[in-house]
Image: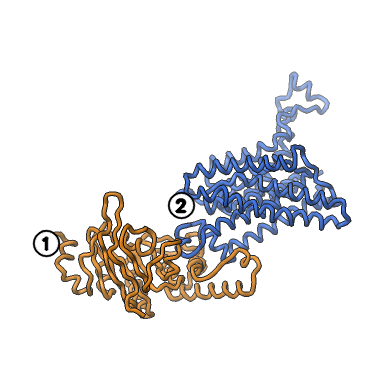
Amino acid sequence: MSEVLLEARRIGKRFGGVQALKDVSLTIKRGEIYGLIGPNGAGKTTLFNVFTGLYPRDSGEVLFAGSPLSLASPHSVAAAGIARTFQNIRLFGNMTAQENVMVGRHVRTRAGVFGAILRTRAERAEEAGIRRRAAELLHYVGIADRADDLARHLSYGDQRRLEIARALATDPKLLALDEPAAGMNATETAALRCLIEGLRKDGLTVLLIEHDVKLVMGLCDRVAVLDYGEKIAEDAPDAVRANPKVIEAYLGTDH
Amino acid sequence: MDILLQQIINGLTTGSVYAVVALGYTMVYGVIQLINFAHGEVVMIGAMVAFSVITALAGSNLPPLVIVLAGVMAAVPACMLMGFLLERVAYRPLRHAPRLAPLITAIGMSIILQHLALLVWGRNPLAFPQIIDNRVFGIGGAAISSVQIAIILMSLAMMAGLSWFVYRTRFGIAIRATAENVHVAGLMGVNADRVIAATFIIGAGLGAVAGVMYGSYYGIAHYTMGFNLGLKAFSAAVLGGIGNIAGAMLGGILLGLVEALGTGYVGELTDLCTWPMAHGWLGERCADGGHFVLFGSNYQDVFAFLTLILVLVFRPSGLLGERVSERA
């Protein structure tokens, strides 16, 4: 098994006249927490959306676990093993927390109308397994007691956790978190940090986009910095922090 | 005879048919925000297919209940197939078109289906053979027939079955997830095409049973019957909050009750002779227990649509619907 999980080669993406990404190449290794930072509008979320199949790329290629990433259907990226959360939380608000997680299992299971109506033994067993797995995941992210509450009734921090649980339900190899700490208070951020560290301990690879530089620097094994659609650094957190190009991008040349 | 109780019974009967038909509108709307105007015609074809089967078997020695059941068993798969084809042929190619296009297509499909039925079954009203001995029971000064009891019970069973399916099974969860956010549901591996096709098929299957019930209740089937029935059921879905399954059930039953009570009392309430101003020429007409009725029971259809208008004015998202701002 190769050490590299995801390799992006010279990714380009253009929106009208704006070159959002210019020949961005990066590699994410198995088991690491890989941070992606950059000033607003640097192209972080665009790159993220290219990886997760939301946007088609204009040029370049993405290799995931050794093979080209297929964008054939909306869920082929999830089926390949990339799961994501959203910067603006996108839960199914009128469904319970447990049901939200159960939806995530669709990637790995078959659900048919006739199976659901006929209640075959295999169908019942699979459904019971899905419920059990959903309960486990809710427990894992620490919101087991909210399983039967509607997602929209959860607190902001719990909604973030629920989104992570739903993403984990797809059995991902790579979990991509889009600004998970956005809008969180200090306590919630600390709890989130514990959760992500737990994910690493359990062998998951995490791609983290985050504005909270302190969180990224404390958590990540390696960090890439984007500025105006170009990668200006990719290194361990301390090295990135000392990189003059990064300081310039964040603070401007005058400082 | 107790008019109030009687009209409640009648209202519950038609109301449960409206509710079952309304489910077909609301499920499809919930998933793809399309008002499937051809749904009423699917219901009509359900009634027609059942009519043909029942008429063909009426001469045989089979027990009446078996004949009716055979009619339903033929109508349901026929309508399911039709629902499937409608989605596949008429709506799926327009999935990403501006919303007006599938809406116009729906109206077009409605006209096409109506005229297909006209070609197959002719332009005359078809009388459902009265093979079931329609027994009438008296309760508290009102009458309820065995057909009414059967319609109400079957509708309740179908509504309970659908609720179980949508709220308790995995496929139901996929349907609700798709209704909330088709894109995110897709990322989670929910096959939107299958979910959408399933809502059409399920709605059409329910509609088929509703068509048979409606036809046997009024004893008649006609190629235009889907239009009015569809419009009422659509009103019921909007009344309850379109896209909301419980809302469609509530809206259907409420609409049936409003219609029945309105029809039952409109004559009495608009009889000018009971009003205090009955004198002069009016007084003469009213003498000896005469009547001068402004609106009779032929105003039946007015109540359904009047209710719809009032709801749209005062609560545009329907009784159980979410506020529109939450959806955006």
Q: Is residue A184 visible?
A: no
**Residue A188, percent from left and from top:** 35, 69
Identify the mark at residue A255; answer none if there is no mark: 1
Select label 2 or label 1 by which is in front. 1
- Identify the residue at image location x=64%, y=72%: A120
**Residue at the limit of the structure toward the top, as seen here:** B281
The one nearer the camera, B120 or B218, is: B120
Q: Is residue A248 above or below residue B250?
A: below
Protein chain holding label 2? B
The one nearer the camera, B90 or B4, is: B90
**Residue A89, percent from left and from top:** 40, 61
- Identify the residue at image location x=61%, y=66%: A116
The one nearer the camera, B202 or B289, is: B202
In the rendered image of the structure, the colour used to display chain A is: orange
Q: Amino acid at mark 2?
A: Glu
The structure's colour scheme is: by chain
User: Quick check: do tags 2 and 1 share a chain?
Assistant: no
The part of the image, by quadrant, that contains residue B72 is bottom right
Q: Amino acid at mark 1?
A: His
**Residue B250, percent from left and from top:** 63, 51
SS of the residue at dot 1?
loop
Q: CA distance from mark 2 to mark 1?
A: 45 Å
Q: Is residue B36 visible?
A: yes
Q: Is residue A5 above or below residue B286?
A: below
Identify the mark at residue A60; answer none if there is no mark: none
Discs 2, 1 touching: Cβ within 8 Å: no
Q: Quadrant of the C terminus of chain A?
A: bottom left
SS of the residue at dot 2?
helix
Q: Residues within 10 Å of mark 1 (few under 14, many from 20)?
A: few
Residue identified by numbered label 2: B326
Q: Residues within 10 Å of mark 2 (few under 14, many from 20)?
A: few
* Chain with blue colouring: B
